[in-house]
Image (tube, rainbow, N blue to C red):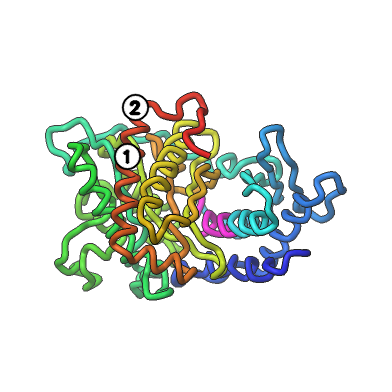
Amino acid sequence: MSNPLFPLLSAGLFCVVATVQGATAAPPDDAGIVAAIVQQMERPLAPSTGTVRASTAADGSWTVELGSRLLADVRGPQIPAELDARLQAIRLAVMLQREQQGAMPPSLEFRFNGHRLEHYFPSPPARPRAHNPLDEGASGVDVFISASHGWYLHGGTTWYLQRPLRNGMIEDLMTPQFAQKFADALDGKKVRWAFSRSVETALHPVAGKPWWQMAARYHAQALYPDRPDIWQSYADRSTPLREYNDDIRSRPLMANEVGAGVLVHLHTNAADPLATGMMAFHQSGRSEDQRLGHVLLCKMRDAIRQVPAYADYRVRVQPSTGNFGENRLALAPSILIELGFHTNPQDAAALQDPQFQAAVAEGLREGYDAFQQGMGAGGERVCQ
């Protein structure tokens, strides 16, 4: 590759996947997959070589054929979260490489022998909503706020945080601060909300960690002890990552249960230290999810830029497609927001700044209002 940053971005690919504590690092051929995709994007008229094939559509999106090798080790009837993470690492590395080349970040759709992942792992119909302990007497909540990760039990023996310490912060322990500020902003507008994770400071009786640090799976278990279909829904109970997968799935399943109007998943990103800024991902083919992401990103950018220290903070205002269980299993419009790169020192400093957090929360609140008012309907661009 001609770009000198490509080796760094390829190295960042392994960082993204390996941050699932207890999981193995990405296979070494993933960097080759990224290189093949980017090379074909640079030379779209040249004949492709090898099994990876990238082709562009009329709307500028790209379809990438990966064959079946990434599915070889997948067990059970459901998409494992670690496969989602691996594919996202590939997608992110391609996006960042193209950005460094001055090209618009591509929208990538992966295919496996011509089919989407859902072809191999069809989801069962959603279970009808039952009793709602989060919002007694009401028909549902307006906004379900999911603050990324937390402590989970790996292999039935060891408790792990799902993300490591980087640049003075841990994603698992930082995103609840954004979630609380967003909820406080919604309170001022009398918008009903619910969290995926507990806010209690008492210790979890098994893990011995504060409840607010625990993954959503355990909060769901406490709320719905008789509903393992919400908090223990991953079918393969032999994998050490079974409760990690339970946790990813529990977030949209809880939101479905409480009748959420929209889902907002708050994360921080990981890649090469040079990567910076905010981005978001929606499930392919869901226009309302895309609209939600675009409106939220535009309003967050406006709010962040009102803070002089962050006037130049990068916000990619067009959400990208990305196959995540958090969005895929949601019945309502759902968006996954990467607030910044905790692997970038400047982004990490911003993520820990109460002023930045407050601006993000106000932008999210304004974005939710605008979404409810129909802004961006019909594909209209809210900002550039």
* Amino acid type, residue under disc 2 in the picture: Gln
- Residue at the image position 64 percent from the left and 70 percent from the top: 8
Question: Where residue 366 is drawn, which disc sits there?
Answer: 1
The spot of residue 90 in percent (x, y) is: 62, 58
Numbered mark located on residue 255 in the image:
none
Q: Which stretch is magenta?
A: 79-89
Residue type at the position of mark 1: Glu
Whichever of labels 1 and 2 marks the residue nearer the N terminus, that label is: 1
- Circle 1: is it few (<14), some (14-19), or many (20+) Cα within 10 Å? many
Specify whether 359 is left or right of 223.
right
Q: Position of residue 320 (x, y in %)?
A: 54, 45
Residue sitting at x 25%, y 49%: 195
In this rendering, the answer to whether 365 lies above or below 357 is above
The residue depicted at 70 percent of the width and 41 percent of the height is 114
Identify the residue at the far front of this view: 308
* Magenta-span inclusion, residue 83: yes
Residue drawn at (29%, 37%) of the image:
260
Q: Which residue is more in the foreground, 104 or 27?
A: 104
Residue located farthest toward the right when viewing the structure as drawn = 47
- Residue 173 position in % (x across, y down): 31, 66
Disc ID at residue 373: 2
Query: Quadrant of the rendered structure where residue 26 is?
Result: bottom right
Rendered image quadrant of residue 285: top right
